[in-house]
Image (cartoon, rainbow, N blue to C red):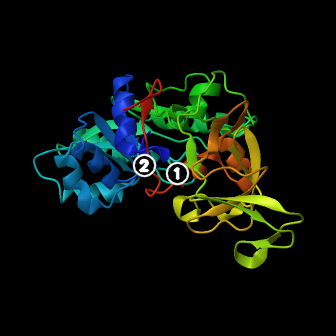
Amino acid sequence: MVKANGYGHGIVETAQFTKQAGATGFCVAILDEALALRDAGLTETILVLGITDVKYAKLAAENDISLTVGDQAWLDEATQILDQKPLKVHLGIDTGMGRIGFQDGASFKKAADYLEQSQQFNFEGVFTHFATADEKDTTYFNLQVERFNHFISQLTRRPHYVHVSNTATSLWHAACNGNMIRFGVGIYGMNPSGKTLESPFDLQPAMSLESELSFSKLVQKGRSISYGATYTAKEDEWIGTIPIGYADGYERRLQGFHVLIDGQFCEIVGRICMDQMMVRIPKSYPVGTKVILAGKSGEKSITMTDIAEYAGTINYEITCGFTQRLPRIYTENGVVN
């Protein structure tokens, strides 16, 4: 899974690295992401998991990109557009996510039979997506498995790919009538359940977020910091400025959280600005001192899950929110690639 710019890690770089590690194909959310991979020279199977406007069906076929289909009307319209090169298609099944896909067996079977008889399509796959695979209660998960198996029983022939397992399913559930895993957030070393379920594997975060102090000053008692003057120094204290803000994806709701400087937690004080933020530091540090926003410093660490928990969200949203203004530096065994 390399959608959403590789969950914020870089779509092309992630695809290239996972290919070397043995990945045989890639899933994206939109056609533009698939085309970006093709432009980068990647020739493996690429599936667009979202619904693509039917007017781009021919473009997808020409670039050997597989598309998700969730209703018969899309197929009927695509038939009028496609010419000699068939379009690879995966039928999406809505077993309980409530997002896209066929909801009843009859319409699903009709579409599957239509694909089998058509020369303009290659019926390549079928899939569903679990809503609660990362939760302790498996009742709804089991219901979705049951529904999916009912849909599959309608097929006269199983397509090449039958896929239901996301990261959470592959970590905490037995095999579910499929032959492919859509491994997502786990690739990036993050637990899809946050801290709800313990991973059976020692997932190591692929991303750290680092900056440095751009300014340091001694602030007198009673002076206020940042917009709205929401923070006022209760005593004379050192304040450091970091050149990262919400335009980089480090959101305002993280006010009051902390970063790591010299192995010590330093509180974010005042509102986070568009391009900068301020932290309370224990002493004077020189400009250029390393700041860890996510990662390790000394014996302490900050994870994306820690950040997400403070912000009231999930680790996925944190990494996906980091904007292109943050340069990505790729290393392997400590060496910059």
- Residue 36: percent from the left, percent from the top? 28, 49
Is residue 23 in view from this perspective? yes
Towards the viewer: 308 or 302: 302
Disc 2 on helix, strand or loop?
helix
Count the labels in the image: 2
* C-alpha distance separating marks 1 and 2: 7 Å
Among all residues in the image, which is located at the extreme bottom? 228
- Residue 168: percent from the left, percent from the top? 60, 33
Q: Amino acid at mark 1?
A: Cys
- Residue 3: percent from the left, percent from the top? 43, 46
Specify whether 265 is left or right of 5.
right
- Residue 300: percent from the left, percent from the top? 73, 34
Q: Amino acid at mark 2?
A: Asn
Among all residues in the image, which is located at the extreme right? 234
Rendered residue at 43%/56% (across/down) = 324
Asked if 291 appears above or below 133 in the picture, the reply is below
Name the residue tied to disc 2: 5
Q: Quadrant of residue 113?
A: top left
Where's the N terminus, which quadrant?
top left
Residues under numbered marks 1 and 2 in contact, where contact means CB atoms less than 8 Å apart: yes
Asked if 275 appears above or below 26 in the picture, the reply is below
Q: Quadrant of residue 233?
A: bottom right
Towards the viewer: 233 or 312: 233
Name the residue tied to disc 1: 320
Is residue 109 in view from this perspective? no
Mark 1: give few (<14), some (14-19) or many (20+) Cα within 10 Å: some
Rendered residue at 31%/55% (across/down) = 32
Where's the C terminus, which quadrant?
top left
Specify whether 88 is left or right of 1.
left
